C-alpha cells in the first residue's frame, strides 16, 4: 500500500477511534458519580483477567488470515471464532467451579462472556482490514468506544454494580459481529486449514 493509500485507509480508523474513545473518556466523570470506587475496582479486576485470555483466545489466527487466500482466510477466521467460543466456555466452567466449590465472588462469572465479546474485536477488525473496509472499521471503533461509555452510564443509572459496567462493556462489542464473514465457512475446510 502506498503512502497516500495508507493515509486514506488509516484516517477513518484513527478518527473513529479518537472520537469513540474521546466520548467514553468524557463520560467517565459522570460514571464515577454513579459507581463507587469499589465497584470500579472489581470491574477493573474482571477486565484485567479477561484481557489475559483475550490475547490467547484466537491463537492469533486472525493475523494469519491477513496473508491467506480468500477461502483460507474465511476458514481461519471461522476457526478463530470456534477457539474463542471454546476458551470462553472453558473459562466460564472454571469460574463456575471456583464460585460453587471455593466460594469465589460471583463477579468472576463475567470473565468467560467478556473474553468472548472482547475477542470479537480481534476477529472482526481483522476481517474488516482484510477486506479493506476501513470506514466500517473506523465506524465500529467509534461505536465500541462511545457505546461502552453510553451503555455503562445507562446501565449504572439503573443499578450501579459490576454487572452494569460489564453489560455496558459487552453491549458495545456486539458491533463486531457484523464484520465477521461467516458465510462459506465449512467445518471440513477449517480442519484442513488447521492441519
Image: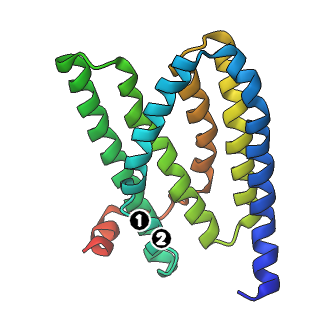
**Residue 25 pos. (x, y %):** 74, 38
- Name the quadrant of the C terminus: bottom left
| Quadrant in the picture for residue 160 | top right
Residue at image mark 2: 63
Q: Residue furthest left?
A: 101
* Label 1 with label 2: CB-CB less than 8 Å: yes
Q: Is residue 144 above or below residue 165?
A: below
The span from disc 1 to disc 2 (Cα, nearest Å) is: 5 Å
Judged from the image, the secondary structure of the residue bearing numbered disc 2 is helix
Please state the horizontal and vertical placement of residue 89, each as a whole percent of the image: 31, 39
Q: Residue at x 47, y 65 (%)?
A: 184
Colour scheme of the rendered structure: rainbow
In the rendered structure, find residue 26 and report the number of the disc placed on it: none
- Residue 109 placement: quadrant: top left
Q: Is residue 69 left or right of residue 14?
A: left
**Residue bearing mark 1:** 60
Q: Estimate how packed mark 2 is, as few (under 14), some (14 to 19) or many (20 or more) residues with alpha carbons within 10 Å.
A: some
The answer to whether residue 136 is above or below residue 157 is below
Residue found 63% across the figure and 16% down from its top: 35
Q: Nearer the viewer, residue 72 or 37?
A: 37
Q: Position of residue 159 (x, y in %)?
A: 61, 10
**Residue at the location (51% across, 50% down)?**
120
Q: Nearer the viewer, residue 142 or 105?
A: 105
Percent x, y of residue 138 = 74, 57
Q: Secondary structure at mark 1?
A: loop
Which residue does the image show at 64% across and 17% down from the upper left? 156
Left or right: where 133 falls relative to 40: right
State the count of labels.
2
Residue 194 drawn above or below residue 166: below
One can see residue 59 in this view: yes
Amino acid at each position: 500500500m502506498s503512502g497516500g493509500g495508507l493515509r486514506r485507509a488509516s484516517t477513518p480508523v484513527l478518527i473513529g477511534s479518537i472520537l469513540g474513545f474521546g466520548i467514553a473518556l468524557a463520560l467517565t466523570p459522570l460514571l464515577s458519580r454513579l459507581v463507587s470506587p469499589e465497584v470500579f475496582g472489581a470491574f477493573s479486576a474482571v477486565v484485567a483477567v479477561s484481557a489475559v485470555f483475550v490475547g490467547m483466545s484466537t491463537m492469533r489466527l486472525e493475523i494469519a488470515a491477513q496473508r491467506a487466500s480468500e477461502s483460507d482466510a474465511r476458514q481461519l477466521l471461522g476457526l478463530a471464532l470456534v477457539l474463542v467460543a471454546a476458551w470462553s466456555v472453558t473459562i466460564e466452567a472454571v469460574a463456575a467451579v471456583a464460585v460453587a466449590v471455593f466460594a469465589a465472588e460471583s463477579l468472576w462469572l463475567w470473565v468467560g462472556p467478556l473474553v468472548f465479546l472482547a475477542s470479537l474485536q480481534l476477529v472482526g477488525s481483522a476481517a474488516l482490514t482484510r477486506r479493506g473496509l476501513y470506514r466500517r472499521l473506523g465506524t465500529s471503533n467509534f461505536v465500541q468506544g462511545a457505546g461502552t461509555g453510553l451503555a455503562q452510564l445507562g446501565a449504572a443509572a439503573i443499578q450501579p454494580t459490576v454487572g452494569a459496567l460489564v453489560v455496558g462493556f459487552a453491549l458495545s462489542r456486539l458491533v463486531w459481529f457484523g464484520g465477521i464473514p461467516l458465510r462459506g465457512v465449512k467445518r471440513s475446510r477449517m480442519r484442513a486449514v488447521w492441519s
